[in-house]
Image (spheres, grey):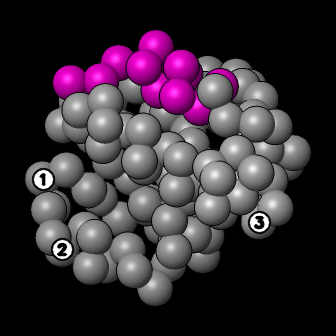
Amino acid sequence: MVTTEDIRRVAMSLPRTTEHLIHDRIKFRVGRIVYVALSRDETLMGFAFPREERAALVGSDPDRFLMPIPSDERFNWVRVRPATLDVTELTEIVTDAWRMAVPKRVAAAHLGD
């Protein structure tokens, strides 16, 4: 089970990431692009994810992954229950979400792609 501190540690290790508290919600972003956000009670984590793949992700494990709320459906976004993740899964999810928010050259330089 991961904690908010685990999420923060992974996100803040990625270049250009800043943390913000907006309407009592912790959000991590690159510039103006939010790539990870926690619910107010920190039981759900939204993250950047390709729209065309999210139904398959949610369908693969609906106890862990959830569709975005209706107002967020137009975005590349999906939600997960952090309590169901281990640190390795969290790192992969947050890093992939970050990769969607940064220029390709920044991701390549950091990840060695």
Q: Say which label, 3 or 1, has the lower sequence index.
A: 1
Work out which residue is located at the far front of the displayed protein and give it: 112
Determine if the magenta segment contains residue 10. yes
- Secondary structure state at the residue bearing disc 2: helix
Q: Say which label, 3 or 2, has the lower sequence index.
A: 2
Say if mark 3 contacts mark 1, CB within 8 Å.
no
Residue at 65% from the left image edge and 25% from the top image edge: 12
Residue 11: which quarter of the image?
top right
Using the image, determine if residue 42 lies above or below residue 69.
above
Residue at 81% from the left image edge and 37% from the top image edge: 16
Q: Amino acid at mark 2?
A: Gly
Work out which residue is located at the far bottom of the displayed protein and give it: 52
Q: Amino acid at mark 3?
A: Lys
Q: Which residues are magenta?
A: 1-12
Q: What residue is shown with label 3?
A: 104
Q: Residues within 10 Å of mark 3 (few under 14, many from 20)?
A: few
Q: Nearer the viewer, residue 10 or 25?
A: 10
- Secondary structure state at the residue bearing disc 1: loop
Q: What residue is shown with label 2?
A: 59
Residue 75: which quarter of the image?
bottom right
Measure how far apart labels 3 and 1 are at the Cα level: 32 Å
Q: Horizontal and vertical percent for residue 53?
A: 39, 80
Measure how far apart labels 1 and 2 are at the Cα level: 9 Å
Say if mark 1 contacts mark 2, CB within 8 Å.
no
Q: What residue is shown with label 1?
A: 63
